[in-house]
Amino acid sequence: MACDLCGSEEGLRAYTVAPKEDTISICSVCAASIEEPTGDEKHWNCLHDSMWSTEPAVQVVAFRLLTQLGAQDQLDMMYLEDDVKAWAEEGLATEKQEPTRDANGNILTEGDAVSIIKDLVVKGAGFTAKQGTTVKNIRMVPGDPTHIQGRVNGTMIFIISAFLKKL
């Protein structure tokens, strides 16, 4: 027997996938960070394999974790039956988060195009994002309404939304 998420065989225990009573086997590492997965994001690379499980309960947990981690690329590849997707979404936290706003107070949404309003030094990338640069198809940062993700000069970077203007 092995962990249904990462394949580890140590410290296994049953995990109930709410709101149904279905259970999966998870290891002690998965159990320690399943409620707050952003604390150990590298561990969750295992979801690239477990998201393809044929077990609906495993698919539900993988979907919820990938959603919390903001792994939109993997979520786009994942296929769930309608009833399984409804189950997965039913268990996601429905916390109200402030909307992400640009410098003018306009609400930004996933996929918008924005323009940078000030030269920004990109730490660790060795370039400056110039004023007037258009960033298309932005992504929201889960849990942080002050930042967005976008591709500038071919590099995916985080940008403070106060330095952006919606196009």
Image (cartoon, helix red, strand yellow):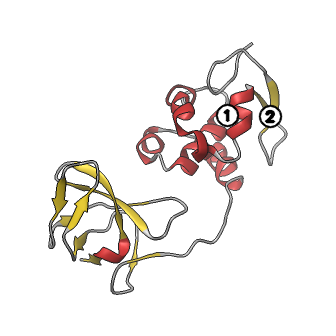
Q: Residue at x 28, y 54 (%)?
A: 123
**Quadrant of res 9:** top right
> Which quarter of the rendering shows the C terminus?
bottom left
Note whether 143 is above or below 72 in the view shown.
below
Report which residue position mark 2 lands on.
15
**Residue 81 shows in this picture:** no
Q: Residue at x 52, y 34 (%)?
A: 42
Q: Secondary structure at mark 1?
A: helix
**46, 120: nearer the viewer:** 120
Q: Are marks 2 and 1 in contact (CB under 8 Å)?
A: no
Does 150 sit left or right of 12 as displayed? Answer: left
Q: Position of residue 159 (x, y in %)?
A: 33, 64
**Residue 91 shows in this picture:** yes
Callout 2 amino acid: Tyr
**30, 65: nearer the viewer:** 30
Distance between the Cα atoms at labels 2 and 1? 14 Å
Callout 1 amino acid: Pro
Does 49 sit left or right of 129 as displayed? Answer: right
Q: Secondary structure at mark 2?
A: strand
Q: Residue at x 18, y 67 (%)?
A: 134
Q: Residue at x 57, y 27 (%)?
A: 50
Does 159 sit left or right of 119 as displayed? Answer: right
Q: Position of residue 30 (x, y in %)?
A: 68, 32
Note whether 69 is above or below 145 in the view shown.
above
Which mark identifies residue 56?
1
Note whether 144 is above or below 37 in the view shown.
below
